[in-house]
Image (spheres, rainbow, N blue to C red):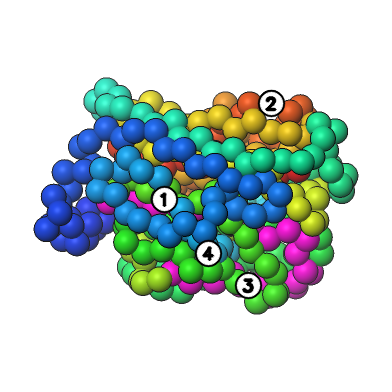
Amino acid sequence: MGLRAGAVLLSACAALAGAGGCTALLGIDEPNVISGDGGGGGVDGPAPESASDDGSDATTDAQGESSSSSGSGSSGGLESSGSSSSGSSSGSSSGSSSGSSSGSSSGSSSGSSSGSSSGGVDAGPIAFVQISVATPGGQHQTPTVTYPSAQLAGDLNVIAIGWNDASANINGVTDSAGNTYSLAVATTRFSPDCSQAIYYAPGIHAAAAGANTVTVSFSIAANVVDLRALEYSGLDPASPFDVGATAEAMSSTPASSGPATTHYARELLVGAGMSTFQYSGAGPSFTSRAVTSLGDIAEDQMVSAAGSYSAVAPLTQTCGWVMQLAAFH
């Protein structure tokens, strides 16, 4: 996590001093499995979130919300702290790898799908439109992110919401365009420092450049929030979500969401990761859309056959991480 490591760890340690402090960072996390509904709801149902000091239990949001920020682009590339994602670029890393892997988890989430292998509504080729990133720092209960470019009616918004504590929960996600957001991949935590969930809004309303701001509402002020808001075209405007996967661990090996089995011939795979240090770029076959100023990642891949897929991204050194995959058709 680069620059945030000291501040985040000090904040986390102080908050958890009565419960073992930062010792959880040295443990090995067990696999987390989240199952859910692929028809348009989230990966998990309305179970309340709970934080676990050893990071071994995946938790989920009953009513999570999503967010947007300030970077856009038509072709993608790595970004930091909310700059445009147009044009290609390579991932940056500031940490050197050290230590050997000390455990991994393969918590996967699969949602049931009623679609056929040929896909549902064919809205044309799936394409990346823009990304916006917000990393406001400090503690925020209602952080926001704004899409910088105009948004087209019928597109898909995907919001990766990360924060650096195990106490805050997502209450909801809204935006100024009046879109409805649903949970795709439930909150997963590497306790006490990383929490992340993915939300989406299908068939969005048109919005002028800079006119749509996404707001995430937390139960309490969340620590060091990292919002990655993406827009895609060519997806089912009514019920695009298929399946998801999620995992957390401490290791030096590439972070992996674990496998999710898709049900459609043409799908969009969105990967998002948090870590206690930072990611160095996208995994094999994925395109990096952002490595934020906090070292977190958003990546994607378009596939043309149903099958088993995982979101993978390399780390710059041994650290705790959360990696999630959401698949849309």
Q: Residue at x 16, y 43 (%)?
A: 23
Q: Disc 4 or 3, which lies upstream in sequence? A: 4
- Mark 3 and mark 2 in contact (Cβ < 8 Å)? no
Q: Disc 3 or 1, which lies upstream in sequence? A: 1
Task: Specify whether residue 327 is in view.
Answer: no
Q: Nearer the viewer, mark 3 or mark 1?
A: 1
User: Where 176 falls versus 319 (above or below)?
Assistant: below
Q: Percent x, y for residue 73?
A: 68, 53
- In the image, taking residue 245 as reference, residue 248 lies left or right, namely left
User: Where 274 falls versus 162 (above or below)?
Assistant: above
Mark 3 secondary-structure assignment: strand
Q: CA distance from mark 3 to mark 1?
A: 25 Å
- Mark 2 and mark 4 in contact (Cβ < 8 Å)? no
Q: Amino acid at mark 4?
A: Gln
Q: Residue at x 80, y 56 (%)?
A: 237
Q: CA distance from mark 1 to mark 4?
A: 12 Å
Q: Nearer the viewer, residue 96 or 134?
A: 134
The residue to which callout 3 is attached is 175
Q: Disc 2 or 3, which lies upstream in sequence? A: 3
Q: CA distance from mark 2 to mark 3?
A: 33 Å
Q: Disc 2 or 1, which lies upstream in sequence? A: 1
Q: Amino acid at mark 3?
A: Asp
The residue to which callout 4 is attached is 63
The residue to which callout 2 is attached is 307
Mark 2 secondary-structure assignment: loop
- In the image, taking residue 115 as reference, residue 4 lies left or right, namely left
User: Where 312 falls versus 48 (above or below)?
Assistant: above
- Mark 3 and mark 4 in contact (Cβ < 8 Å)? no
Q: CA distance from mark 2 to mark 1?
A: 26 Å
Q: Nearer the viewer, mark 2 or mark 3?
A: 2
Q: CA distance from mark 4 to mark 2?
A: 29 Å
Q: What is the magenta range?
A: 192-218
